[in-house]
Every structure is written in C-alpha cells, then in structure tokens.
Image (spheres, rainbow, N blue to C red):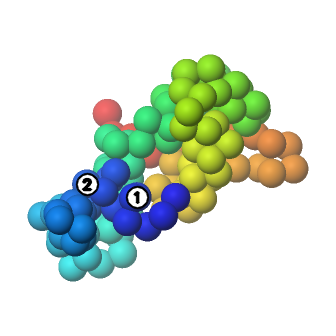
Amino acid sequence: MPLIDAAVMLQFAELEQGQVQLTAIGKDFAATTILPIKKRFRQQVLQHSSGISSIVQTLRERRSYSLQTGFFLNLWENQSPRLGAKQQFTTAVDWRCYVELFEYDSREERLLLTDGRGGLEG
C-alpha cells in the first residue's frame, strides 16, 4: 500500500487540493517517541483497517489463538473481491511488526496472536 494512501486511511494525513496535510493525530504521531508511536499506530490500525481488526478479533475467538491464512484470504475474497484479498493479506502481514498484535508463520501459513488478547485493552 503506498505510504500516502496508508497515512490517509489511518487518518494521519489528509489530501487537500493535491497537497498532503498532517492531521492533529499525524502531527502527534510524528513528534512522539517509539513506544507511544507503536501504541498510536496500533490504535489507528484497529480503528481504520478492517482487515487487521478482523484478524485480531477472529484469532481472539479461537481457542488456539491461531488460524491458517487461507481462512482470511477466503473470507476477504468473498466479502470484498474488489479490494484484493491477497493485497489486504500482504499489507496486514507487513504491518504486523508495527502493530505487534499477531505473528505470521510463513512455513505453516498460519497467523497467531502474540498474546491471548491480541494486545487489546479490556
């Protein structure tokens, strides 16, 4: 996913007359140290990325806290074929390092929560 598209989706930036403008959240994000940045990024992703929030919610509901990747690819292909399930999955896997909510085992093609709650409060 291109950087500007991601920043707009996560509400870190807005496009105004072809110019990129940081939002208040984006300015706060840019001026913060690494631990608060990770927390803010995680919050924005969970609020504005239906793919990652669906991964976390679904994995939280599983006793093993894990699922084969094919489950999500099939789900997304059926729900929103125009978005491209493979691209959504690739973005989710790329962003997992930053949101620290789940891991991806490429050998077993399996997603697994990093803890039993998926890093969510409550």
The relative height of residue 95 versus residue 72 in the rendered view (above or below) is: below
Residue occupied by mark 1: 6
Which residue is drawn at the image coordinates 57% and 53% (left, top)?
91
Which residue is drawn at the image coordinates 30% and 57% (left, top)?
8
Q: 5 and 54: which one is in front? A: 5
Which residue is drawn at the image coordinates 46% and 56% (left, top)?
99
Query: Left or right: 72 with respect to 70?
Result: left
The relative height of residue 23 versus residue 68 in the rendered view (above or below) is: below
Quarter assignment of residue 88? top right
Query: Left or right: 17 with respect to 121?
Result: left
Distance from Cα at disc 2 to Cα at disc 1: 8 Å
Give the percent coordinates (x, y) of residue 54: 50, 31
Quarter assignment of residue 121? top left
**How many marks can you see?**
2
Residue occupied by mark 2: 11
Q: Which residue lies furthest to the front in this view?
A: 17
SS assignment at label 1: helix
Give the percent coordinates (x, y) of residue 77: 64, 27
Q: Which amino acid does label 1 sit on?
A: Ala
Q: 34 and 27: which one is in front? A: 27
Give the percent coordinates (x, y) of residue 43: 32, 49
Q: 47 and 6: which one is in front? A: 6
Is residue 62 visible to the viewer in this orientation of the structure? no
